Image (tube, coloured by chain):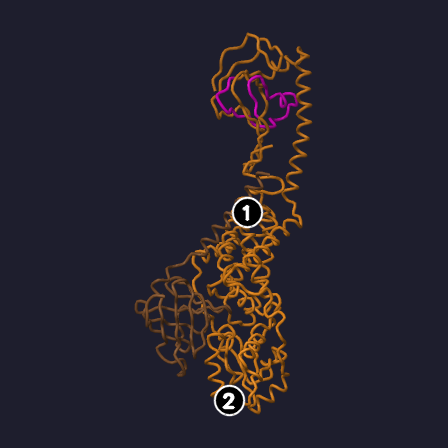
Chain colours: A orange, B brown
Amino acid sequence: MTEGQDRSSERKVDGLILHELGQEVVLPAGARIVTQGEAPEFFYIIESGKVKVFRETADGIRTELTELAAGAYFGEVALVTGQPRTASVEAMEESRLIKVSKAEFDHLLDHNPQLSRHIINQLSQWLVHGDRRLESEVVHQVKLRQISWFDYALMIGLSIIMALVVNIYNDNKIPLIQDWGKGAVPEIALNQALEAYQNNKAIFVDARKSAFYNQEHIKGAMNLPLILFDLMYPLFRFTVEQTDTEKNKAIIVYGGSFSRRFDLELARSLKSKGTERVAVLSPYGGWSTAFPLEGQKPKAPASLPLGIPGYVEWLPVGIFVLILIPPIRRSPYLSVACRLILGFIFISFALSKIMRPAVFALNVVDYGLMPAWGVNLWALVLSWAELVVGLFLILGIRTRAAATLIGAMNVIFIVGLVNAIFHHLPINCGCVGEVGEPVNWWKVSKNAGMLVMCVQIFLYDRFFVLDRGGFTLRERKI
Amino acid sequence: MKRYSLKWAAILGLLVVCLALGGCGESRSPFAGTYRSVEPFVGKSYIDLELKENGKGTWTLEGKTVEFTWVVNDGRIWIYTKSGAIIIVSPGNGGKMLSADMTADWHAGCPPQSCVTFRRVQEGG
C-alpha cells in the first residue's frame, strides 16, 4: 500500500463534490483493504480500478457480495453503525482510492446533507436488495434440498426403459418372466414321494447347482443342474437308462427355492425332451426334513479376484473412521468423494452384469428371496438402476435422490448377504456379474459402509451438484 | 434449455463410453478351433467342442448340439450358455489342451471330479 499526500482538489463521487478530503492510496491487485470483523477506521472512495466485496465464514466458504469500480465508495456502513466491518474488500486490479478517516467522515456527514441523504438512500437500497438476495438464497437452498417423486420416477423409469430396450436387442436376452404361460408341472406330495423313495419306485433328481447339491441332498439323488441341462442331458439320459433298466420309474425333481426356478424349469425341460413320468416335489422345501440326507461339510464357494473395483470397494469401510471426526463427517467435500467412489463402484458392477442378464438372474435365484415372476425383472432392471444412479452421482444430478436409491439397494443387499451367511448358502455374491466374490461379513461391512456414504451424501452434499436450485460449485455467488 | 441438453448429452456420452469399455475383451484367435474330449464323458461318449473366432461355439454330445458364446478373459476361456451357466475353461500346452470346469461354479481351477479335458484337433474357426 502506498499513501499519497493530502487531497485538496475537488472530486466527484456519484455526483457529489467532495472538498479537501482524506489521503490517496494506491493498492496492487489482490491487496486486502478491509477485513471482515475488524474495527472501522476509514471510509474509501474509488478513483480508479476495481474491488470486490465479500463475506467469508470461519471454515472458508466465501460469498461474493458485489464488485465496485471507479466512482463508488465503501466502508460507510461500519462507520455509521459503529459495529465491526460486515464484509471484506479486496482489490481486483491496481486501484487508486481516497482513504477518509472516521473524523473526516463524521464531519462530512454533519456539513453535507446531500451526501448524508445519498448514503441513507444507498443503505436503504442495500437493505431491500439484501432481503431479495436472502429470499433468493433461501429458495435456492430449499430447492437444493428438495426431493420429489419425479427424481425417483426419472431414475427408475430410465432404468426400466433402458433395461427393456437393451434386452430386446441383446444376443443374451432373457424373458421378462421366466416360463410365463408355460404348462403346469405335475406335483407329488411329500408322503407319496417318500413312499416311492422307500420302494425304489422313483429316481430323484436335484435341480440345484452342484455346490448346493454337494452340501446336502437326498441320499442317492442324482444332480442335474438346470443351468447345465443343455450340455449334460445326453449323459443324464444315459445314466437314467443304466439305472432304470425296466423303465418303470418316475422322475421326481426337487431342489426348488422360493423362486421355484430350478425344479419347475428342469421338470419342464425333461418333459420337453420326451420324459413322460416327471413330477416336482411339493412342498419344495420339505425334502430336507423328510428324506434321509447325505452331503459334505459346507465349504467356501469358488471365487475369482475382482480387480480394481475390488480395491475401490474397500474404501467404504474407511468411512467408519472418517465419520468419527465431526468436521470431516459434515464436510461437503467428503460428500463429493463418496459420490465418486459409489458412482465408480456401482457403474463398474453394473457393466459387468448388463450384457449377460441370465447369469445375474441365476445369482438372484441363489439367494432364494425373490419370487419366480420377479427374478428376471429384478436382474434386468437392477443392473441398469446401478448404472443410472451411479452416473447421476458422478455427474452431480439429483444426488440426494440417487443416494437414497443406492442406499435402498444396499439395504436389500445387506439383507440378502446376512440371510445367505446365516443359512450357509454356498453361493457367490453375484454383485459383479462374472466374478465369484465370496459372501462373508467383510462383504456386509463394505455394503454397510456404502450405506453410510449414502446417508452422508443425503445430509451434506452441496458442492458440484446440478439440482433444482441450479449448479452449485465451491463458491456461492449471490 | 441449453443446460439440460448438455446434461443429457453428458449422461448419454458416459453411457456409451461405459458400454463400449464393458464390451472389450481379449483376442479369441489363439483358442479358436475344434476340440475333442480326451476321454469319453463318463465312459459313454466323446464331446466335440468348436470355438469359432466370431465368439460363437458349439458343444456336441451324443449327436445333440448346443450353441453358446465365448470370450477370453485373463487368459481363460469363458463359455456362456443360453441358460446363464458359465463354464470356465483353462488352456494348457499353448492352447492345445483345454480343461473345462463342469461345476459351473466359476472355479479358477478345475476340480478333478468335475473336469473335462479337451485336445485340439483342428485350428481356426
> Which of disc 1 and disc 2 is earlier in sequence?
2
Q: Amino acid at mark 1?
A: Ser
Instruction: Specify the farthest residue to the left.
Output: B93
Kind of element beneath mark 1: helix
Comparing A371 with A368, the one in front is: A371
Task: Judge whether A198 appears above or below A457 on screen.
Answer: below
Q: Amino acid at mark 2?
A: Asp
Marks 2 and 1 share the same chain: yes
Q: Position of residue A352 (x, y in %)?
A: 48, 59
Which quadrant holds the C terminus of chain A? top right
Comparing A262 with B62, the one in front is: B62
Kind of element beneath mark 2: loop
Comparing A174 with B105, the one in front is: A174
Count neighbours of disc 1 (C-alpha within 10 A) and say few if under 14, some if 14 to 19, many if 20 or more. many
To which residue does mark 2 refer? Answer: A244
Q: Quadrant of residue A187?
A: bottom right
Q: Point out which mark residue B92 bears.
A: none
Q: Quadrant of residue A383?
A: bottom right
Q: Position of residue A38 (x, y in %)?
A: 57, 27
Mark 2 vs mark 1: give the one in front. 2
Q: CA distance from mark 2 to mark 1?
A: 65 Å
| Residue A56 is a magenta residue | no
| Residue A84 is a magenta residue | yes
Task: Judge whether A260 appears above or below B21 on screen.
Answer: below
Q: Is residue A155 left or right of residue A172?
A: right
Q: Position of residue A424 (x, y in %)?
A: 53, 72
To which residue does mark 1 refer? Answer: A335
Q: Magenta region: which residues? A: A67-96
Q: Is residue B63 left or right of residue A476?
A: left
The residue under the point 58% across, 49% down is A457
Task: Judge whether B18 appears above or below B56 on screen.
Answer: above
Q: Position of residue A17 (x, y in %)?
A: 61, 10
